[in-house]
Image: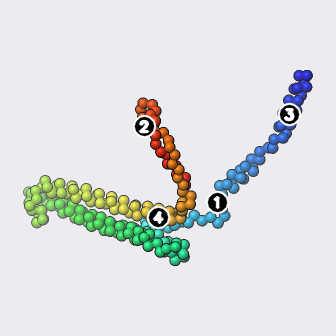
Amino acid sequence: MRVFYLFIVLLLTFATAKGQVPVNNKALKDSSKTDTIKPAGYVNKGQIAGKKAIRRSLIFPGLGQMYNYGLVVNDVKSGYYGDKRVFQKIYIIGKIGLIYGGGAVLVSSYIENNRMYRASLAELVYRQENDNTSKDPQFIRYETAYLTTAKDIAKNNREIVLLSLVALYGANVIDAYVTARLKYHNVENELTYKITPTLINSSTMYGFSAVPGLKLTLKL
């Protein structure tokens, strides 16, 4: 009887092994490649527009914003928008004005601080070489200690303004790129949110102390 049961078990095991379909590794690889391949003719308009905006902004500040303005104008002419996008145009023009206005203020401030630094430095050098005698009439009433402080302040201001100009230039490039990319990124029909009650741990040092709260979940 045991031999008969053993024969039945071996028969079922063999039948199960034969009934399994061998895995085709090649088919799995092909299917995984198919899932990752982008559709034929796919064009990432946002990436293309972003690169163009960056190149223009690097060449000259504000050119990237002008490029984005042209994109809006073209969409209005083609009928893509139902309105004239007046506020969006004003917003882009305002950013261009801010770039040039801020740049003009910073450049004039750099020129003034650089002039003050060089003039006070020349005055200090002259006084040191000529027994504390003043050379520049605008510095006659100022003591040497005051001129030394003024020279250092002007130098620091000049460096800060120079860094501010670099930051403004970088902000101009980043703004042009982000605006161009977001123009082709529409999440109006895909963005959803969910608010659910939850418990928040208010004590990170002495174990768990539950406090009721709300959890916001965004789905892009």
- The amino acid type of the residue labelled 4 equals Thr
Q: Which mark is residue 179?
A: 4
**CA gap, disc 3 and disc 4:** 66 Å
Q: Which structural element holds mark 4? A: helix
Give the quarter of the image for residue 66: bottom left
**CA gap, disc 1 and disc 3:** 46 Å
Query: In the image, residue 99 lies at what x, y percent?
Result: 36, 67
Q: Which residue is mark 2?
A: 202
Tell me what residue is drawn at x 52 percent, y 73 percent: 82
Question: Which badge, 1 or 3, is on the more N-terminal residue?
Answer: 3
Q: Which residue is mark 1?
A: 38
Near-viewer residue (110 or 1): 1
- The amino acid type of the residue labelled 3 equals Leu
Tell me what residue is drawn at x 45 percent, y 31 percent: 207
Query: In the image, residue 153 lies at what x, y percent?
Result: 21, 56
Give the quarter of the image for residue 44: bottom right
Rendered view: 74 above or below 157: below
Residue 8 appears anywhere in the view: yes
Direction from residue 5 to residue 120 in the image, left or right: left
Rendered view: 20 above or below 31: above
- Give the number of the mark in front: 1 or 3: 3
- Position of the C terminus, as image quadrant, is bottom right
- Give the number of the mark in front: 2 or 3: 2
Question: Which badge, 2 or 1, is on the more N-terminal residue?
Answer: 1
Tell me what residue is drawn at x 71 percent, y 52 percent: 31
Direction from residue 112 to residue 190 in the image, left or right: right
Q: Which residue is mark 3?
A: 12
Query: In the image, residue 52 lies at what x, y percent?
Result: 50, 67
Tell me what residue is drawn at x 46 percent, y 72 percent: 85
